[in-house]
Image (cartoon, helix red, strand yellow):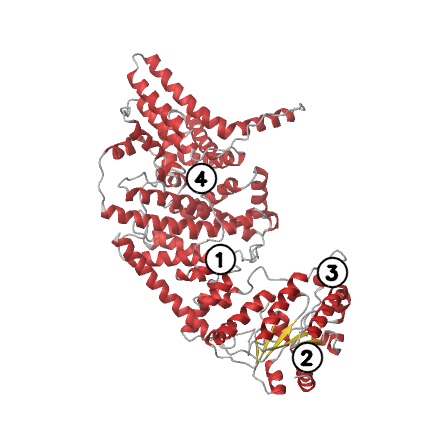
Amino acid sequence: MLYIVQILVGAFLLSYAVQLAADSGLKKMKNTLFSEWNAILKGNINADMVILGSSRGVVSYDPDLLSAASNNKVHNLSFNAGSYNLQELKYSLYAEHNKKPKIILQNVDLAHFSPSAQLPEEHQFLPYLDDQGLKKGLGLFDSRYLWVDRIPLLKYNTQKRFLGIGLGSFLGKKFKNKDAVTDGFSPKSIAFKRDGHNLKRLSDPAFKRSYEKDLAQMKSFVKARIKDSITVILVWAPEYKERLAVGRRLTQPLKQALADFAKEQKGVYFLDMSEDSLSQSSDYFYDTFHLNTKGAHLFSAALAQKIKDLERNTY
Amino acid sequence: MLVFSTGLDYFTALKIENSRSKTERKTWFWISVGVNLGFLGVFKYYDFFAVSFSKLIEGFGMQANPFLLNLILPVGISFYTFHGLSYIIDIYKERIKAERNFIDYALFVSYFPLLVAGPIERATHLLPQVKVKRSFDYQQAKEGIHQILWGLVKKIVIADSCAQYANAVFDNYENMNSLSLILGAVYFAFQIYGDFSGYSDIALGTSKLFGINLLKNFDYPYFSRDIAEFWRRWHISLSSWFRDYLYIPLGGSQGGTWMKIRNTFIIFLVSGFWHGANWTFLAWGFLNALYFLPLLLSNKNRTHTGNIEGVSFIQGMKLIPQIGLTFALTCLAWIFFRARTITDAFGYIKRMFSNLQFKPQYFNIERYNFELVLMLVLFVGFEWFNRYKIEPISGKYSYPKICLAIMVLLLFGVYSEYKSFIYFQF
């Protein structure tokens, strides 16, 4: 028995030491999703305005431009490939560790109202799985997260590449970062590529969506923020004209519902910028749904102006 | 099934021993053998023969509508049937005395570490250990833990990782290039080795915790210098069972050339058929017989019997092609073992030698074909430098090696889906 205990203790300590080194290596990598979570969970952000959204939120909203125009500290909390349920999880963790913002910019679109069933880019959570709030939230998607951190190294079993990166970073190695993240914003300088499969799906008359439940969920999230005295601005960012055309039958009722909600709910505003002039040229997009770096800067500048106008006219 | 088979063999063994005449003795012997093989035949082979026979009839233009049983194969039937048979044959040949204590006999047949996938034990080896009072042996238990741990590494890390790659290749071989097909066969070779020898290590190690030593089942078979040596190192308990209870009674290698050839084919075909009711297993057995025969006929089948001792550079240069050729021939035979049908196996081999593209290929499991090679090279290296031992963990630096093995299990083990042991199906 003692022998088994000796083995387990030795293996545990060694594995834990390796994991600790990899975790701290990942945590110290600047301008990455790891540094983003580090700032969120350590309460280092404390922004006046936060941006919530999915991939469109990540690539389109430049906190620097929004900040310069409004004199507010702005941070982008968008969750790549994450729908409203993941965005809400990220926000709740942010609010738990940081001061509450005055304004939330919520990116909305068709994808926003399809809840995520799976966790995207799971590696981003690796060094933070000991955080109880995060663990509990991730556990809703995959029960493995409720216990996986109790066995050292097991969390790296499906993410071995990041063990290497973490250990390398711990030992001082610098890694190339193709997708640098600054204040949660990660613009993409990629040439336009028509995502025909998505357009085909949208244009199929058999493709239908029901938003009632998800819209109600979003409304209750927004109302809870209003109770916290936070202004919520719903923003529909530009989409390329081809997508606008094929998706109109689906987006129109949703936009109307959002406009109605903004009209009836104090503290909520809806800015539909989907058909902004940017939507006319593929120069500003890397596919029909996502703005590229150039488009993101122009959009963010235009949005900053709109928010300014809104502030002047309303609150 | 298990209770019936155990009761039958216990009872008939006593009857054989207490028989007053040769005829009575023979009658009880054949009752036991007949019922044991009858059960195995019905459960494992009936449907195969019915379908094959009906296809043969249809080949002559006649209509056939075979009656199929569609029975679920009882777990471990091939193993406990062979336990019982070896016991009955040994009693009949008066090598051992019949066991009077039913509990001891039942434990011999149903001893849990070996029940579902062996090793196939002999009454002469296991029963005496069951009968003596055992006390906890710390050193033996320690060895057992090492063996269990190494078995887990072989199963969860090596076999299950290789399984993902081998499945990706074999299930989609029509779209694979030569490099992927070669690697697919190599991955399957390590999958089945890691899976089955890993299970055997876990069974042997677990048994050591109870103070019982089971028969060694694997002895680093991929370091064999020829096919004859491979068969002395692979699934040793089954090979030796067939040698002692089939090959030698048939005359072994004592008779003339034709007798040697006949006996070689019988033993390899039966061995293939033991694995399952499918032509692919028979083809695998046939191919191994073809490999073995030249060695037997030229009296070279016992050239390599001992371990590979300290190897000089020149010896090493000689060993590499010997071991490499044996491994290549084994991999070729494994293609038949793994393929769904004989046609698939030939299609696989044909494409492997005709495609001649050797570029890295991306599999549908989102992995490149070469990604496991480094892991296998490290595994082979680790086994090579520890080939004198029962398992590589014991001995010098065992404590850091254990810690490393646990870390490897945590990091490289495949836990995403449940993977049963391959030999559970036999």
Mark found first going from the N terminus, 2 or 3? 3
The residue indicated by pointer 2 is: A299
Name the secondary structure under disc 1.
helix
Residue closest to the eye, B216 or B205: B205
- Chain-order first, disc 1 or disc 2: 1
Residue A285 location, x and y as percent?
A: 69, 73
Alpha carbons under labels 1 and 3: distance apart:
35 Å
| Circles 2 and 4 on the same chain | no
Find residue B424 and name its label. 4
Please tell me which residue is depicted at 30% across the width and 60% down the height of the picture: A10
Q: Which mark is residue A143?
A: 1
The answer to whether the residues at label 1 and label 3 have Cβ atoms under 8 Å apart is: no
Q: What is the three-letter code of the residue carrying label 2?
A: Phe
Residue A200 is marked as 3
Residue positioned 42% across, 69% down in the render: A23
Name the front one of labels 1 and 2: 1
- From this view, report whether residue A306 is shown above or below residue B254: below
Q: Give x and y (percent) for residue B414.
A: 46, 53
What's the amino acid at mark 3? Answer: Lys
